[in-house]
Image (tube, coloured by chain):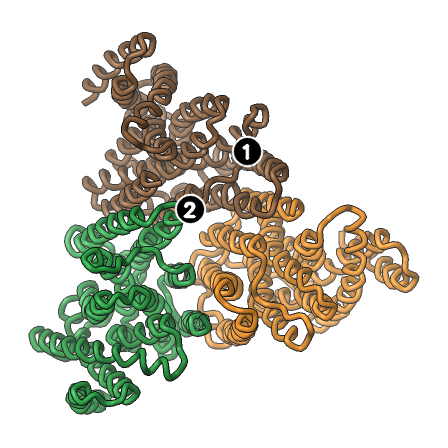
Chain colours: A green, B orange, C brown
Amino acid sequence: MNLIFLIITIIGVPVSIIGSFLHWTPTLMFIIDCITIIGLASFMGRATESLAIVAGPSIGGLLNATFGNAVELIISIFALKSGLINVVMASITGSIIGNLLLVAGLSFFIGGLKYKRQQFNIFEARHNGGLLMFAIIVSFVFPLVFSTKLDHSDVRVLSAAISVIMIIIYLFALFFKLVTHRGVYKKNEGAKPEEHEDPEWGLWKAIIILAVATIFVAYISENLVKTIEPVARSFGWSEIFIGVIIVAIVGNAAEHASAVMMAFKNRIGVTVEIAIGSTLQIAMFVAPILVLLSLAFTNFLPLVFPVTDLVAMVLSVLLTISITTDGDTNWFEGALLLASYVIMGFGFYLL
Amino acid sequence: MNLIFLIITIIGVPVSIIGSFLHWTPTLMFIIDCITIIGLASFMGRATESLAIVAGPSIGGLLNATFGNAVELIISIFALKSGLINVVMASITGSIIGNLLLVAGLSFFIGGLKYKRQQFNIFEARHNGGLLMFAIIVSFVFPLVFSTKLDHSDVRVLSAAISVIMIIIYLFALFFKLVTHRGVYKKNEGAKPEEHEDPEWGLWKAIIILAVATIFVAYISENLVKTIEPVARSFGWSEIFIGVIIVAIVGNAAEHASAVMMAFKNRIGVTVEIAIGSTLQIAMFVAPILVLLSLAFTNFLPLVFPVTDLVAMVLSVLLTISITTDGDTNWFEGALLLASYVIMGFGFYLL
Amino acid sequence: MNLIFLIITIIGVPVSIIGSFLHWTPTLMFIIDCITIIGLASFMGRATESLAIVAGPSIGGLLNATFGNAVELIISIFALKSGLINVVMASITGSIIGNLLLVAGLSFFIGGLKYKRQQFNIFEARHNGGLLMFAIIVSFVFPLVFSTKLDHSDVRVLSAAISVIMIIIYLFALFFKLVTHRGVYKKNEGAKPEEHEDPEWGLWKAIIILAVATIFVAYISENLVKTIEPVARSFGWSEIFIGVIIVAIVGNAAEHASAVMMAFKNRIGVTVEIAIGSTLQIAMFVAPILVLLSLAFTNFLPLVFPVTDLVAMVLSVLLTISITTDGDTNWFEGALLLASYVIMGFGFYLL
């Protein structure tokens, strides 16, 4: 299995780079880039897993989320610079519903086929659930409702103010988790102790592999995004569908791979950490950073999303919270999340 | 008590049948039919209870829900055939809020008058809560929001696609509960072990009584529905009020009777199973089946309900989840649900 | 500390009374009144704390909520008499988000700086969470949605009917808590037993101090409200911002002081009781009473609030429930609630 990914990566990376310089057709490049990213993502997944074992599940989950979303942040900055506000909004929406429904759903489903029940720390799940509710409500629901009674410049001020507070709270959340309350909420409830295993790679080897893979993923993802629009036009898809579904799937390939892998190894706590942690980072860090950066560009990115995007995000959060609140997953809960993802994807396809 | 129901049934069934052939006045027929159904419902309740004891609470609850909703499915198909889309929508809404607020509320209240606290399996309650959230969100909230941006034929496609996925997930849910995870979530938490008691009737006797009573209920219910409109017109009620309140109460008489009976016998787990299970069956099975059947009729039934109906359903689900999530009921929680039902009913009455 | 409050009160009360007779400038009176109320609130807090120790946390929390909201009820009746419907609505909204986000947030934050984790009875938290959901949904969400399809006189009838039912349910809730289920839900879960300590004042001394302080707070609050509008106009604030933020902060000073004090003494259960209990009293008792009283005045107060107010209330409830459902608080959860309050306050400031 790992050999296949190694071959894909060794062949894919140079071919993708050569192709981007020789301007091969978008459809061809699209396929090459997707496959290469899947290969790279497996390395990122294994490197992150090694780091997770060395550093413990909390920081491991954080690393996963950080490295996964670096790709999306870079892509979004380029899109923002080109004034593609709709694509940025759609890819934020897509990342959120993708992480909550697709990444978590596939992990729970596949993990659940192997294990009857997978359990995780219920305290952490509820802490993250509360944070998720806060992030979505304050970042997205609140600005949309108030924007109906505000003029354009007030929406700008409100979006910027919320973004600043959101970044502060995100830093507080890290401080809380890693400094003041490190380990406080562990071992409280009957979560199975996670098996100790040896990391595949040492600390520095894992870091180097993660860094190099991340750079390649970023480079190839950027090319991939350029090819998506022409490809999509020839398939008759809308800009929103591309952002919500395609960008989100490709951009979250890394999280996806490691989350599923962790579920398969019965370390479902790390899976939940990745899926929800990545969502939180998008809502509380990536989106606010993009809003603040857009103040420097011609087109401002407000926190006022289309109502369909907002509803899809809120429904995803409600579903995830109601499914993870019992600290227990199984194949059926995975199937529920996947079914929701398919239905929402179909909805965005029809738009 | 049982003697009274026996007398009602023995007199009511033939009188109701004779009356329907002799075309007695709607108001008279309405009263006769209602009383007869209450009598029949008591037999269904006792038969189901016997089966529940033989088969265990899960299948018992499933049987209850199936036999209760068979009546509604038949009525709705006739209404759909006659193009009465509004009545069908109103009776789906009414069944959902009726099961969640009236059936559960009355059971918790009456059970709570006898017992200080009634406890049930918290795992099952949360599993069902998650499923309920999923069903309402995906079946009703999602289509309404997306329909604002879609044209008529796309709404048709989206409704049909959601219906197909919903039926698949419903079958998955049964497979999960009865095959792969049968009994997995039992005895996990401090739910009181339910007392073992002997069934009133044996397996086959119970099945035959249940089957015969169901047939009579179906026959009489159909006549009842015909009488409701003329009766209502003379009382000055709206079509929606009839569907939401009257049809739902009559159509759910069977669940109602057995849910309350179970609560009275301190088997509150079965009560919750009936109320939530019946709601799930309406949202995930009856409504999707009706949508797919309506493709064959002239008037299509979309999953896009009036916003008042939708809000009533969503609020009922939120209330039920927040009240059942602690695995513990009492008279006051029953009173809360009943008060919500009365207020919603009054709202629909004013429309 | 107590000495400072004593000095503030002894100087503030006569100065405030003299100032109101000599018609000093609104800005000066505003500052004097605010400081005096803070001094009086400290006495109310200490008296209530003494009573809470004597009477146990439930009745103590109830007393807190009652004495805090008596002020708001009196102010609102005067405002209603003057036809200031918008100010009354804004101050109801402000009291609800103030109690849930500011009072609870500041208490959790300050308590969390001293204690790593503060735990409280999870059963009571969930009971109150369910009640809160019910109160907000039925009192405010439901009338707004149905009002879109009803004419003016039906909105009146619906608002009055809901108000009557809400007051009945509120009385049921007290009956449930203090009579039928007194102490039933205590000691069930691992909540730390609250330390026994001696009350500062005896029963009657505490009652007299509480009563006298309440009368002065009511008198000064009324003057304060008169000064707010002129002061606000000179600062360029809107009527809604004043109602939502200023009136709510001043009006809830008493709860505020005692809730924070209880958190600081690690009696976080009483803090939660005060914050949520006060909210419940506003939604289920103060607002319905005002609606029914307004039937006698020229301007009717419907339960149909502006959509921004409604969303702020619903989001506050969702945040509070998702944060208190685990029966455990810390500084970060306090920071989350405070950040939400700041953002909502800024939103209302921009309106």
Q: Left or right? Give the position of C279 relative to C259.
A: right
- Label 1 neighbourhood size at 10 Å, few (<14), some (14-19), many (20+)? some
Q: Position of residue C94 (x, y in %)?
A: 38, 35
First in sequence, mark 1 or 2: give its number.
Answer: 1
The picture quadrant where one finds residue C63 is top left
Q: Chain of mark 1?
A: C
Of residues C3 and C180, the one nearer the viewer is C3
Q: Is residue A298 visible?
A: yes
Name the residue type under label 1.
Answer: Ile
Which label sits in the foreground, 1 or 2?
2
Q: Is residue B57 visible?
A: no
Q: Which mark is residue A255?
A: none
Q: Position of residue B56 (x, y in %)?
A: 57, 67
Residue placed furthest toward the right: B22
Q: Position of residue B245 (x, y in %)?
A: 67, 52
Q: Quadrant of the C terminus of chain A?
A: bottom left
Q: Left or right? Give the position of B348 relative to C104.
A: right
Of residues B327 and C232, the one nearer the viewer is C232
- Where disc 2 sits, the SS reads helix
Q: Quadrant of the N terminus of chain A?
A: bottom left
The picture quadrant where one finds residue A259 is bottom left
Residue B103, placed above or below residue C56: below
Q: Which mark is residue C167?
A: 1
Residue B189, placed above or below residue C293: below
CA distance separating discs 1 and 2: 23 Å
Which residue is found at the position 41% from the left and 44% from the top? C308
Of residues C154 and B349, the one nearer the viewer is C154
- Label 2 neighbourhood size at 10 Å, few (<14), some (14-19), many (20+)? many
Name the residue type under label 2.
Answer: Val
Tell me the residue that label 2 is attached to: C311
